Amino acid sequence: MHPALADDLSRLPELLRSARDFAAREVSEIEARPVVQQGKAPDPRPLPAEGAGAEGALARFAERWAPGFAATAGPRYLGFVTGGATPAAVTGDWLTSAYDQNAAGGDGSSAAALERETLGWLRELFGLGDAHSGAFVTGATMSNTVGLALAREWLGDRLGVRVSEAGAAALGPVDVLSGSPHSSIPKALSVLGIGRDRLRTVPVLPGGREAVDVARLAEALEALDGRPAVVVANAGTVNTVDFDDLRAIAELKERYGFWLHVDAAFGGFAALSPEHAHLTAGIDAADSVCVDLHKWLNVPYDAAVQFTRHQELQVRVFHNASPYLGLPTGEPDFVHLTPENSRRLRALPAWFSLTAYGREGHREIVERNVAEARRLGEGIAAVPGLRLLAPVRLNVVCFTLTGSTTRERVHALGRAVAESGEAFLTPTFLDGTHALRAAFSNWRTSGADTDRVLAAVTRAAAQLAS
């Protein structure tokens, strides 16, 4: 054995304690760390010939790289829809690496059974029935891709084509309808060979809404004259957290027989709050559902789930035909349900967090985030030079400048907030207007954090106006 490896093995408990202590310091100081780092990253160095051992590697990381890591897991990083990692989830994630289980297979380990238990808990959490089965994937983009891959196979069945054997070209043109699809939807259509151009945007409700106009969706479906189609419904849009009327769309499904995919990447967590659970009513009628766990469940990257009522199609698309894996009979191994043949036990951090805090603990995170989003929205509405671009429906505050809203001015506002080190917001474009959005999904975010964000935005707006 290489001397550095042998030495690390003999001192493994000590090395793990050093890593634990370093991580504990970093996490305890996350609120003091700049939310984004503005400095230049270190220049690359040559690959070491002999290596410095784990202790030396930790020292070099602490010196060269750790100072440049941003506090994206902190309470004032409000860009995109980014959660943090609860204490229990971090514990589970560390053990995931320590056990190093390949959860794609089911032989010789209870890892896959733990994953199935976790999927059952999540299915219950989001209001899905027993007809839905699930599988872990990397994130919302992959979850949407898997769901639409199943839709592609379903379309083939309707047209007498086995797409998983003959290829996407055998389908011919496909109709995919949606009101306000997330950018990952056309990306998935590109990956699947369906094509970005086959996504047809259906008009949304008037008055600054992002929810699809169900009557116009019915007209679009009627115009297809019986051709099978895919409808992508949104349970929480990224700009304003608007929800399609899932129950009404489910009724259309009974009439027109399309495949219904629901993108509930973070909006699905509305089901945890009694005040907002009605927004996800009807989700159980979906043929496939996307939910992203490293958003509002606050587990580390990467973790999402894909639910479907059609596991037989999932096996047909993703089964891995190999003598050493066996046939997907009975309860199929996860290797036959997603694009990955091998992966880490993504369920363990989620299992730890759900076990530690239960439904009520995660409900409290959702409701606290929603309350803080509303409070920030009220504060921004009172700041001279700023205006809300949409009502705060759940956990996202979408706002812009008064007067000129050019890309340059709005982005300058966002940069000024980021350069303060106090907060990070992402730019967007809504109804022809450049804007910023603050998304609350971190378990640590408190009223004091919201006050600091509002103060940073207020100062940046004043600087821009001067």
Image (spheres, rainbow, N blue to C red):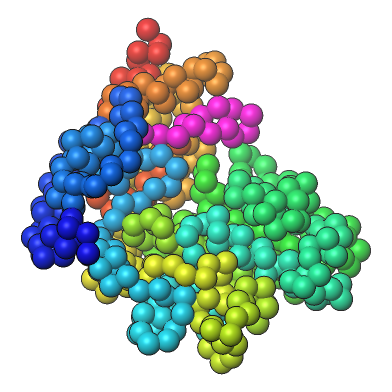
- Given residues 369 and 162, the one toward you in this image is 162
Where is residue 188 drawn, in percent x and y? 65, 54
- Given residues 21 and 387, the one toward you in this image is 21
Which quadrant: the N terminus?
Answer: bottom left
Where is residue 5 drawn, in percent x and y? 20, 60
Determine the residue positioned at 14% across, 50% down: 55
Which quadrant: the C terminus?
Answer: top left
Instruction: Based on the picture, tell me whether residue 1 belongs to the magenta stretch.
Output: no
Which portion, as a residue range, is magenta?
A: 422-436
Quarter of the image where one finds residue 92: bottom left
| Looking at the image, residue 256 lies above or below residue 87 | below
Q: Is residue 289 left or right of residue 448?
A: right
Quarter of the image where one finds residue 34: top left
Where is residue 350 drawn, in percent x and y? 34, 68
Q: Is residue 246 left or right of residue 372?
A: right
Q: Is residue 392 left or right of residue 94?
A: right
Specify whether residue 401 is in view: no
Determine the residue positioned at 61% across, 39% down: 208
| Looking at the image, residue 294 lies above or below residue 113 | above
Q: Residue furthest right?
A: 225
Determine the residue positioned at 52% across, 71% down: 341
Instruction: Based on the picture, tell me whether residue 425 belongs to the magenta stretch.
Output: yes
| Looking at the image, residue 108 lies above or below residue 73 | below
Determine the residue positioned at 53% across, 88% down: 331
Helix, strand or loop: magenta stretch: strand
Q: Is residue 240 left or right of residue 454?
A: right
Q: What number of labels is visible? A: 0
Specify whether residue 363 is in view: yes
